[in-house]
């Protein structure tokens, strides 16, 4: 391992009681060894540098709570890294990490883990030990599945699986009943598990650019859902239970294969945005007149659509309609 350099100048004016150090964008290619003298350091930012490895001496920073290596050249994390059990937030996004050690299970205080934009093909089973995790960022890797132990991550509030290679989501996903936001866009999903309806805390679901053909009937159980983004799938119809999403404000269905809409869509009285662009719609249910909160309705690029006579009533209520 290369000798760690002493950083000149004022770059590291650090007292032994300093709790935060920000070395973002300092063109560092090695770890400044002075950092390891800071026993009380709790927050360390080394973002946007040129670091290719983390030295074993990282273990000396036993009080670290937040550590960020965003946008470097790391290919792995040393075993000692996972001995810093005080860590609550770790960001190693935008690196070149291809695998994670099972030792990650030692970080039992971890609440935020950001490992998106790397080269991961699988995750360790020990990830499921991190039951205090609240935010898990896994986007833009090469993942095809989640380890079964992830069913234990019941305190998760945010999960991002976007831009991976998932063709399905696990049934245990329904166990994550505290999840507020789920992002799965840019995958190869053709369906969602029936257990999806157990995500009763979910407020946002982003699934654009997949291959979804339909939604499970249980989808109507997501009564706290506010935003539903299903752009660019192959949906041919929606279940009647879609009308049970009483708090839904944004529904994006553009670029699908919808030929009709369920009558129950008129029950979405909180809906403000309804985007139906680029589908195969020919008629619209009269129940759309009941969407009293609707501000924008986009129907462009439905070439066979017959416009109903009651359209002007929606416009009179303040809805902008694009046809």
Image: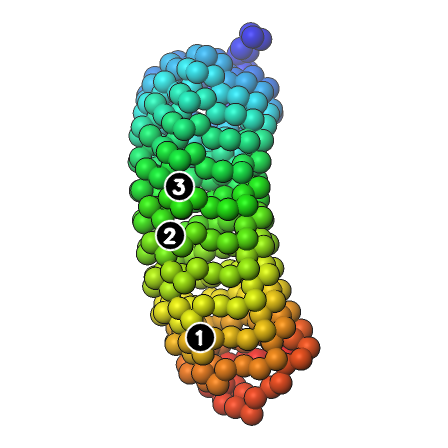
Residue at which label 3 appears: 135
Q: Position of residue 18 (x, y in %)?
A: 36, 24
Alpha carbon separation for disc pair 3 and 2: 21 Å
Q: Is residue 41 above or below residue 175?
A: above
Under tag 3, what secondary structure? strand
Snapshot quadrant of residue 107:
top left
Tell me if 70 is positioned left or right of 136 in this view. right
Tell me if 108 is positioned left or right of 316 in this view. left
Residue 70 shows up from this direction: no
Of callouts 3 and 2, which one flags the residue occurring earlier in the amino acid sequence? 3
Alpha carbon separation for disc pair 3 and 1: 32 Å
Total labels: the figure holds 3
Q: Nearer the viewer, mark 3 or mark 1?
A: 1
Residue at which label 1 appears: 265
Q: Position of residue 73 (x, y in %)?
A: 59, 25
Alpha carbon separation for disc pair 2 and 1: 22 Å
Residue 107 shows up from this direction: yes
Residue at which label 2 appears: 195
* Quadrant where the N terminus is found in the figure: top right
The residue that appears at 36% across and 49% down in the rendered structure is 174
Q: Position of residue 54 (x, y in %)?
A: 50, 18
């Amino acid at each position: 391992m290369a000798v760690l350099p002493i950083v000149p100048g004022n770059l590291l004016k650090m007292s032994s009681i300093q709790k935060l150090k920000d070395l973002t964008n300092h063109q560092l290619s090695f770890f400044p060894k002075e950092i390891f003298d800071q026993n009380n350091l709790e927050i360390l930012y080394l973002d946007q540098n040129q670091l290719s490895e983390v030295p074993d001496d990282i273990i000396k920073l036993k009080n670290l709570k937040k550590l960020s290596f965003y946008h470097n050249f790391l290919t792995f994390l040393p075993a000692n890294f996972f001995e810093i059990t005080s860590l609550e937030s770790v960001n190693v996004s935008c690196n070149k990490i291809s695998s994670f050690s099972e030792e990650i299970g030692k970080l039992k205080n971890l609440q935020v883990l950001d490992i998106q934009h790397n080269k991961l093909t699988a995750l360790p089973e020990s990830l499921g030990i991190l039951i205090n995790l609240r935010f898990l960022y896994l986007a833009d890797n090469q993942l095809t599945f989640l380890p079964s132990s992830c069913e234990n991550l019941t305190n998760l509030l945010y999960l991002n699986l976007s831009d991976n290679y998932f063709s399905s989501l696990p049934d245990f996903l329904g166990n994550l009943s505290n999840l507020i936001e789920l992002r799965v866009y840019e995958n190869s999903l053709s369906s969602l598990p029936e257990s999806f309806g157990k995500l009763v805390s979910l407020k946002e679901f982003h699934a654009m650019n997949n291959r979804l053909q339909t939604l499970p009937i249980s989808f109507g159980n997501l009564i706290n859902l506010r935003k539903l983004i299903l752009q660019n799938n192959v949906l041919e119809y929606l279940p009647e239970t879609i009308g049970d999403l009483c708090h839904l404000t944004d529904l994006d269905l553009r670029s699908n294969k919808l030929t009709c809409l369920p009558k129950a869509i008129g029950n979405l009285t909180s809906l403000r945005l309804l985007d139906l662009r680029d589908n195969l719609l020919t008629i619209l249910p009269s129940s759309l007149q009941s969407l009293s909160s609707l501000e924008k309705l986009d129907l462009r690029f439905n070439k066979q659509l017959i416009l109903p006579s009651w359209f002007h009533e929606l416009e009179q209520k303040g809805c902008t309609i694009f046809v």
